[in-house]
Amino acid sequence: MAQLSPLLKQATPVQVARGEGVYLYDHDGRRYLDFTAGIGVTSTGHCHPKVVAAAQQQVATLIHGQYTTVMHQPLLTLTERLSEVLPAGLDSLFYVNSGSEAVEAALRLSRQSTGRQNVVVFQGSFHGRTFGAASLTTSGTKIRAGIGPLVPGVTVAPFPYAYRYGWSEKEAVDFALRELDYLLVTAAPAADIAAFFVEPVLGEGGYVPAPPGFLAGLRERADRHGILLVFDEVQTGFGRTGEFWGHQHFDVEPDILITAKGLASGFPLSAIAASTELMSRGLPGSQGGTYGGNAVACAAAVATLDVILEEGLVENAARTGERLLAGSRRIAADYAAVGDVRGLGLMVASEFVNPDGSPAPEIANRVHRTAADLGLLLLTCGPHGNVVRMIPPLVVDEAQIDQGLELWAKAVSSGLG
């Protein structure tokens, strides 16, 4: 009998039967508070009625219209509607299916449009699992191990992970930018660099928000050296951080923006956005794909955007995210094993450490499993797997945040007891 690959590792033991809002239900009817949101995908919650209705209507009308062969209305409508929320000047879009594919497209465009072949990424980055995207990924060896040689021309610079270094955020930023400048005159000549790829908040690398000044420092250096600045907003986009895009917290604009995950509330859809002038510098025919811009996924994305705007979910993410972060910090204050609590909007993480300050993945895993047993679904992340992250759907309310914090407090107490 066929079975799933043994290389897949399940984060929780739950076999889900249905989902509604912020809750998942197993086949026995047990309810779980889902603070994973499908790794940040179900932005409008599970099975939001407006998203369901839009998808159902589209399924009955047109399921697939390959968009380099024919054009369809959901794609055109989504493109028009995204202009309402994209940064000024990013007026050209290319659609694919996953975050990895969008990263690949951004890498291709960066190289073709600049005539340069090299890129810089930042320590702890996660950009995907396909070969080009994996070559840009440094969040953990499991993405890169055993598959080399990877795509050449990638240089890794420090990310200002202040807690890891034991410094203030300013010290970490000064160090990271100083090291980047050194790289540009040593291992990665600035004249050969096509782009900087960076996440406004490290995702798989540990849920580390970029400290103030870092992205601005990248923008200044990109402009000075003719380098493109690419923001990977696969996880931080579509309201997740309490702004529509994560980079908006830092008042810095990208040349290329990558979006996926929360874009279509669970339907596979991703995109890159750039100016028409920049996009036109790629090679004709270099963009395409069989399933990119799928009609049903685009219809779901239009409905997702409607829900986010009509229900004020960006503002809700900011408000409930502050509550989640503050509550997590109150719980952590009682336990030396929780070395750091950090986050931005509805991206909140607790980092577990041993008494000597070293990473404690065994503690994080124990607390994570205990939370699932109690009915709270979470995920781990970080290079050592010692960070537990909370990613509720953007529809979460304050009562549900408090419910999650109550379960989290019990899980931490039990896991550390």
Image: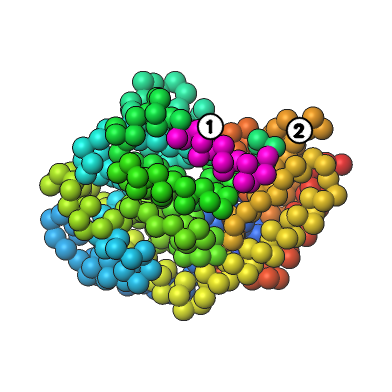
Circle 1 Cα neighbour tier, 10 Å, few/some/many (<14 / 14–19 / ≥20): some
Residue 357: mark: 2
x and y, in percent, of residue 396 in the image: 61, 67
Q: Residue at x 44, y 53 (%)?
A: 233
Q: Quadrant of the C terminus?
A: top right
Which numbered disc covers residue 105?
none
Res. 140 mark:
1
Side of 250 relative to 97 (left or right): right
* Image-based side of 277 in relation to 29, left or right: left
Residue 169 highlighted magenta (yes or no): yes
* Residue occupying image coordinates x 29% and y 63%: 89
Which quarter shows the N terminus?
top left
Distance in Å between CA atoms under marks 1 and 2: 20 Å
Locate residue 227: give its quadrant: top left
What amino acid does circle 1 point to? Gly
Element under label 2?
loop
Q: Is residue 264 above or below residue 54?
A: above
* Span of residues in magenta: 167-181
Q: Is residue 306 above or below residue 349?
A: below
> Which residue is more in the foreground, 320 or 245?
245
Q: Quadrant of residue 275?
A: bottom left
Instruction: Please give the name of the residue rendered at 25% of the width and 44% of the height, measured from the top-left corner.
Output: 109
**Dot 2 amino acid type:** Gly
User: Residue 30's quadrant in the figure?
Assistant: bottom right
Specify the principal SS of the magenta part. Answer: helix
Q: Position of residue 162 (x, y in %)?
A: 64, 42
Percent x, y of residue 287: 20, 47
Q: Which residue is found at the position 50% from the left and 39% from the top?
A: 177
Q: Is residue 318 magenta?
A: no
Q: Nearer the viewer, residue 7 or 106?
A: 106
Color encoding of the figure: rainbow
Local packing at callout 2 (Cα closer than 10 Å; few below 14, some 14-19, many 20+) is few
